[in-house]
Amino acid sequence: MKVTALLTLALAAGIAPATQAQTIGNDKASVTVYGILDAGVARVEHTQDFSAYYQAGTVVTPTNTGKASALGVYNGGLSSSRLGFKGEAILSGDLKAIFTLEAGINLPNGNVNNSAISIAQSAAAGSTITNDGSTSGQLFARGAYFGFASNTWGTLTVGRTQGFGLDLIPSYDAVQGAALFTPIGFSGSFAGGGYTDDSRVDTSLKYVAKFGDVNFGYLHGFGGVAGATSAQSSNQLNLGYEHGPFGIQVIYEAFSDAFSLSSAYTAAVAATTTPVLNATTNKVVTLTTPAVPAASGVKATFADTTATLVLARYKVTPSLLITAGYENQVFSAPSNYGKDATITSLYSQPVFATAVFTTAGNKTQKVSWIAAGYDLTTSLNVAIGYYKSSFSAFATSATATTAAGNSNYKSLLIDYRLAKSVDLYAGYMGSVSGGSSTTATSANGEWPNNAVTGVGARFKF
């Protein structure tokens, strides 16, 4: 039904030509239909079945849910596939009204992105990949907002908007923040300050402005929880400087009662009978406790999260780009746990179980990367990247502690631009984990690892 609605909207907007301009009263308004179609074939060394709903189609990080390899069609090797509509109406001077509606599409099968369904299916069947995501069945999951824009005063929007991490990380990664071949592109948790769901923010106000070489941004997410103003709220700040070949960005993100999704399962309980003495009749009667069937679904884990990101890039020569980034994430017990019932209406799958991150202490996670890209010709770019994620030991209770862990990734991307709108590419990412990040062990006892190799194409319109 949702895919049908998307196609209807696309036809109604008139894809050819992409931009339709018309006069509304004294205002000149235009609507543009745009999108990206990106897909290919990849082999993942350790995985379960490819998913028909997860936005990438497969999980490429270390995993404990599958040791076999799989060959399949993925979605979004460089950029997630999408269909969008954006428009503007000139009001006066350089002031205009704007809007954006953007849907995430699983190109191999035509579904809209739905991480929540992939998680629920995995919990029930245990045969498909499971991974959290910020696009979970909403029609315009990638963005739905409108507002006002001015070259002089900046842009103010309201609705479902991207966080600053998701806005900026791809352009501060020489491997393009490739969705299948870099961890910072694959996992929105780095852009979401720790939790993938927070890379996009519902019910938010967002302001961005650029003054000369300096850019500034502020985003506030409203929780809307009665009796708890701060519950499920968020704040983000961005300050950056870009001049010539050099750019640097600083981002701060804070989320109250953020949540991540995972699969949950409870085993079936057989019926039981218990003999009980009836004190009134002085006779023994049998009480029967009915059987409880197995249940599975989506589990939400709540936490307060904060993150600070520093991103830098430098164009050494017209052909050579160097990028680097560092992020510090802190997870703590949620401030308003128990006042978050609204989560059940945010996703297409009901929340089966909830939990808190920890009540005994904070967890600190650090993410860093360095990457380089080189244009061999005007059409051919080769990029390599190294990414590391590590977290400190942290207490999960008064008597239990989770040991420190780390994951390391190496990426290679070869991108050939056939035209301005069409790419052919090949990519590889290998990953190795240690410490308590050791979530899977191969048959010969090596460290937990995974690798993905793929070839694909991207068409932008």
Image: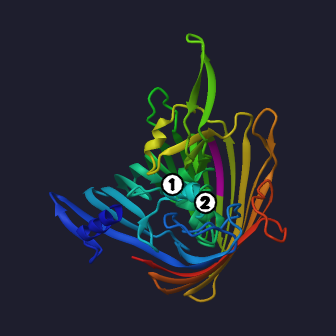
Are the two marked residues, 1 and 2, in contact with CB atoms closer than 8 angstroms? no
- Specify the segment rendered in magenta: 305-310
Residue 89 in the image, given as x and y percentages of width and height: 26, 59
Q: In the image, what residue occupies the spot 44% across and 51% down?
A: 348
Residue 351 on the magenta span? no
Does 112 sit left or right of 378 as displayed? left
Residue 7, picture quadrant: bottom left
Residue 460 image-quadrant placement:
bottom left
Q: Amino acid at mark 2?
A: Gly
Q: Main secondary structure of the magenta part?
A: strand
Query: Which quarter of the figure is the C terminus placed in?
Result: bottom left
Closer-to-camera residue (236/233): 233
Q: Nearer the viewer, mark 1 or mark 2?
A: 2
Q: Position of residue 87 (x, y in %)?
A: 31, 62
Colouring convention used in this rendered image of the protein: rainbow
User: Would you place residue 19 above or below residue 125 in this image?
Assistant: below
Q: Name the residue located 51 percent from the left edge and 35 percent from the top edge.
A: 340
Please give left or right for residue 155 compared with residue 23 in the image. right
| Mark 1 residue element | helix
Q: Residue furthest left?
A: 25
